[in-house]
Image (cartoon, grey):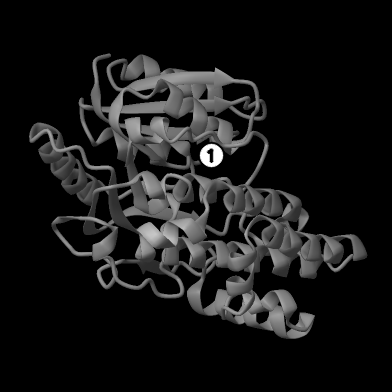
């Protein structure tokens, strides 16, 4: 294969029941896309065979990597190591892309490549597809970003409480990801937060398309964002949060890119809040001590940032009474439907 316009990496782990829908929507992108199916040591179903079937059927589009189980992050890493696309996007195997929106996004990316104007980050909307009640909730950014033109961080507005950039909304330039040494940890959930956070200071040019591209399927029984699952995996949430704390000096970044630093500070505040809440939901003495240790970790790394986050509306939960904090979290979850 020569260089492609974009690489779609699809980490697959025992995904046979739903991955066809995902791959079929990607295939509508045509010959100048690349799909890398990363079989992450699947053993319980026909995922490896399905991956091989697509590679045999679409040899100019689909590539397959079979690896020992390394978790979602290693699937993303493998895709990035092997990508030939100018741009790189991760699509989880139980999600899919809207075909009409995909066509518009690819046309715009072709224009950037043809004009030899490398764009570091394209942003598009994503839609929560709630299996429990059959509802949809689109997440859009028209109040945050200029629409239909290239811009920089100094041009952005303020994000709303639920408007964080997620893995679903971003398309990065592949070489930029490699230059910022992005490497996600193995056997760790919630690493998509690192994927969408660590590269941001390396991004110089952005473009926002107000189209509902990514369809985020939510509500599957084993999904990592279910409350009971998150409680059982809270140590991994804490690990990811600490890696994000270590990724950048936000106090220094504030001097150079104040709007970007404000956004990243709010994102980190949200991660501190989620970690604190689920440690409180566990409720054991060990987890409550771990909550205090997490805040101490932040204070040790960046005392100014720690002081600032302690008094933000999101992160005050770290010091709220347990019942008030958990009640606030569950109300926010109901309103914003984030899991």
Across and down, in percent, residue 273 comes to: 64, 69
Closer to the camera in the image, 323 or 202: 202
Residue that protrudes farthest toward the left in the picture: 115
Does 5 sit above or below residue 235? above
- Count of marks placed on residues: 1
Closer to the camera in the image, 273 or 202: 202
Residue identified by numbered label 1: 17
Q: Give the residue displayed 33% in from the left and 41% down from the top.
A: 172
Q: Badge 1 local density, few (<14 within 10 Å), some, or many (20+)? A: few
The part of the image, by quadrant, that contains residue 39 is: top right
Q: Give left or right: position of 110 versus 187.
A: left
Residue 248 can be seen, yes or no? yes
Closer to the camera in the image, 239 or 96: 239
Q: Give the residue displayed 24% in from the left and 48% down from the top.
A: 205
Q: Give the residue displayed 28% in from the left and 42% down from the top.
A: 120
Residue 37 can be seen, yes or no? no
Does 110 sit above or below residue 244? above
* SS label for mark 1: loop
Q: Give left or right: position of 98 versus 219.
A: left
Across and down, in percent, residue 105 comes to: 20, 46
Does 36 sit above or below residue 234? above
Residue that protrudes farthest toward the right in the picture: 285
Across and down, in percent, residue 134 comes to: 46, 67
The part of the image, by quadrant, that contains residue 64 is: top left
Does 81 sit above or below residue 287? above
Q: Give the residue displayed 45% in from the left and 28% down from the top.
A: 79
Q: Give left or right: position of 221 versus 2.
A: right
Q: Give left or right: position of 42 versus 134.
A: right
Q: Which image quarter is the N terminus in?
A: top left
The part of the image, by quadrant, that contains residue 159 is: bottom left
Q: Which image quarter is the C terminus in?
A: bottom right
Across and down, in percent, residue 26 comes to: 31, 37
């Amino acid at each position: 294969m020569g260089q492609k316009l974009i690489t779609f990496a699809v980490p697959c782990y025992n995904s046979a029941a739903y991955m066809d829908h995902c791959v079929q929507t990607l295939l509508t992108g045509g010959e100048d896309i690349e799909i890398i199916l990363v079989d992450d040591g699947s053993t319980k179903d026909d995922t490896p065979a399905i991956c091989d079937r697509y590679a045999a059927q679409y040899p100019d589009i689909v590539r397959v990597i079979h690896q020992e189980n390394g978790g979602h992050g290693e699937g993303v890493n493998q895709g990035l190591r092997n990508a030939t696309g100018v741009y790189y996007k991760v699509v989880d195997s139980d999600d899919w892309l809207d075909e009409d929106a995909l066509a518009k996004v690819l046309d715009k990316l072709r224009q950037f490549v043809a004009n030899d104007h490398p764009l570091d980050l394209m942003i598009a909307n994503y839609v929560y597809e709630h299996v429990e009640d059959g509802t949809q909730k689109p997440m859009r950014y028209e109040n945050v970003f200029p629409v239909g033109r290239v811009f920089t961080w100094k041009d952005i507005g303020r994000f709303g409480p639920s408007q964080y950039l997620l893995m679903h909304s971003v398309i990065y330039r592949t070489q930029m990801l490699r230059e910022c040494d992005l490497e996600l940890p193995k056997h760790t959930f919630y690493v998509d937060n690192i994927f969408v956070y660590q590269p941001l200071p390396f991004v110089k040019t952005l473009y926002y398309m107000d189209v509902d591209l990514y369809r985020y399927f939510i509500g599957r029984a084993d999904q990592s964002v279910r409350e009971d699952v998150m409680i059982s995996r809270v140590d991994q949430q804490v690990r990811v949060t600490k890696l994000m704390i270590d990724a950048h000096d936000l106090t220094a970044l504030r001097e150079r890119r104040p709007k970007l630093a404000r956004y990243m500070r709010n994102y980190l505040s949200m991660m501190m809040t989620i970690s604190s809440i689920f440690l409180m939901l566990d409720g054991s003495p060990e987890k409550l001590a771990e909550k205090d240790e997490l805040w101490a970790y932040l204070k040790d790394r960046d005392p100014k940032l720690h002081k600032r986050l302690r008094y933000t509306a999101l992160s005050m939960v770290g010091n709220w009474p347990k019942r008030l904090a958990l009640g606030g979290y569950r109300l926010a979850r109901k309103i914003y439907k984030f899991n």
